[in-house]
Amino acid sequence: MEIAITIFLFLALSLGSFAPAWYTGALHHKLGVRLPYTFILISGISSVVFFIAGYLPAQSAIHYLPDYSCIAGQLIVLIVGIKLIAEAIRFNPEEKIVLIDDRQTSIILSLAKGINYLFIGMGIGLCYALNFYSFIVLFGLEIMAIASGLMLGNHFGLKRSIRTLFLISGVAVVAAAIRSIVVQF
């Protein structure tokens, strides 16, 4: 995968972070509770840490794997994309929005979201090497997506149409994975 596809993948993942942040901001507005600004930093850091935790072991193992390890990595990314699509279809905001009122809840939600980043990092790590700036870009996109989602959700309230952003995020991840698999052949 070249850098443009990596940035596209990072944007798709950030879009997937924007939607839950929107719902969290809307719920806090509805209940009149202060926005969880610490969630922005905790979630952004955990996303990058999980990504690196998947990326580095895959990168260190790539020298011992066969030449088609990149296809296996992109299949992992494809499976995560399909999982995101399935979650988007099943998502019902009235049932699954969580009030983030302390750091413990922020950390638990960040850990749950981090599993996707772990496997995406593993998939990318099996294909090619990223430089340090890629991780900074991912962190910046995550922070911007979560912060803007919280504030816009707080301002505009619950919108069922935001749910489609989950779906678009999953479709974009699947498209990036399929494109990378096709390029391998």
Image (tube, rainbow, N blue to C red):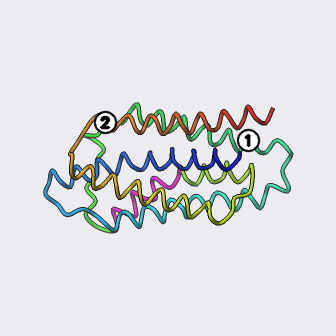
Q: Which mark is residue 92?
A: 2
Instruction: Say the numbered circle drawn on residue 109.
Output: none
Q: Earlier in the sequence, mark 2 or mark 1?
A: 1
Horizontal relation, residue 123 to residue 139: left or right: right
Q: What residue appears at the point 64 percent right and 38 percent down from the top-left corner?
A: 177
Location of the C terminus by quadrant is: top right
Element at label 2: loop
Q: How many marks?
A: 2
Q: Residue at x 30, y 34 (%)?
A: 161
Q: Position of residue 102 (x, y in %)?
A: 28, 67
Q: Is residue 24 left or right of residue 59?
A: left
Q: Give the residues drawn in magenta, as a range.
A: 104-116
Q: Residues within 10 Å of mark 2 (few under 14, many from 20)?
A: few
Q: Is residue 76 left or right of residue 48?
A: right
Name the secondary structure under disc 1: helix
Residue at the (63%, 48%) spot, across then down? 6
